[in-house]
Amino acid sequence: QLILALETSCDETAAAVIRNGHEIVANVVASQIESHKRFGGVVPEIASRHHVEQITVVVEETLNQANLTFADIDAIAVTEGPGLVGALLIGVNAAKALAFAHQKPLIGVHHIAGHIYANQLIKKLEFPLLSLVVSGGHTELVYMESHGQFKVIGETRDDAAGEAYDKVARTLNLPYPGGPHIDRLAHEGEPLIDLPRAWLEEGSYDFSFSGLKSAVINTVHNAKQKGEEILPQTLAASFQASVIDVLVTKTVKAAKEYNVKQVLVAGGVAANKGLRAALEEAFAPLSNIELIIPPLSLCTDNAAMIGAAASVRFAQGKRSDMSLNANPGLDLEE
Ligand code: ATP
Ligand code: MG
Ligand code: FE
């Protein structure tokens, strides 16, 4: 079974071919980061224009690398949401055109289901499982009893973890996207500043990062007024310590309460070295829970993960038709 998958929900134009839901045959990502950098974030109009220019080239390059033609492909998958509507539309329309022209089944995929299924490219999934989703727009704990069944047991009430990283990076005058820069600085400093941790109500698996973000901004502001100097390394380390403390503590607690066999980590912030190390340390003593963290290239946006998620829908007989549309507010739980 060979699936050609497309992903254009944000600022990477990506295509991939996945065999049997878990094997990467080809995986091409054209990043637009350089074009958005000088604006300090993703500019939707620029993203759409890049997708239009890149999508055909990226699909061709993917099939070339895979050494396949459309005749070999069993289905065409695409991210239908959530994301930037103009960006999603390019991928959805390209996928519809290809599916129509080559008479292939079409499969719409939820972007976050994709991030979660990136883990299937590493290991066979075993249920029940828990997934910590930490990306630019989402911070969620997702419980799964079986394939394609998502239950959000906790989510952020304000900023996503990646969003907090990017905003704090901006305060420290670091380039977009700020996550990797904060990560690097954090390893050069000590978490000497005591920043807040939003535990929320007893038993809640929800998250909140806006208070932490404000605390960082206030700390920088107050230091400036007093003429004191705080090392960016110290701030980055303190901020990262707070984020990781909450993410890891809640993930461990939920994994135990829900008695899961596996814990998956998903989304761009899963590329964070501090978070990966802290999760590995926390789950090492829990021998009945298997922790899976994808390599960095499968944490950030890519189409291989969309192909992996699509293979499950394909096997379950789920198909989209030509009415498939970009849906920026698509619900994971359906
Ligand atoms: P979503 O998946 O929620 O729609 P998105 O697709 O924009 O959002 P991703 O591409 O999954 O998000 O992740 C991008 C985010 O990951 C950015 O906020 C970026 O700063 C963050 N990120 C990437 N690498 C790291 C890192 N090493 N440490 C922390 N954050 C990181
Ligand atoms: Mg991105
Ligand atoms: Fe993403």
Image (spheres, grey):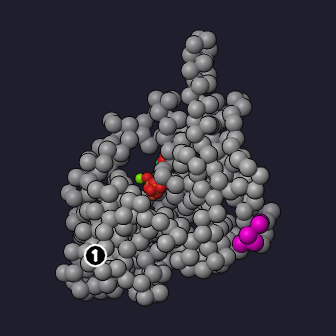
Up-down relation of residue 210 to residue 68 (above or below)? above
Q: What percent of the width, then of the height, locates residue 206?
A: 65, 53
Up-down relation of residue 42 to residue 113 (above or below)? above
Badge 1 element: loop
Q: What percent of the width, then of the height, locates residue 185?
A: 57, 36
Report the span colored magenta.
Answer: 256-260
Q: Which residue is mark 1?
A: 323
Q: Is residue 257 magenta?
A: yes
In this view, the residue in front, 136 or 328, is: 328
In this view, the residue in front, 139 or 8, is: 139
In this view, the residue in front, 262 or 208, is: 208
Question: In which quadrant of the rendered image does the N terminus lie?
Answer: bottom left
Q: Residue at x 58, y 39 (%)?
A: 210
Q: Is residue 273 magenta?
A: no
Which quarter of the figure has residue 204?
bottom right
**Residue 15 visible in image:** no
Q: Residue at x 63, y 59 (%)?
A: 154
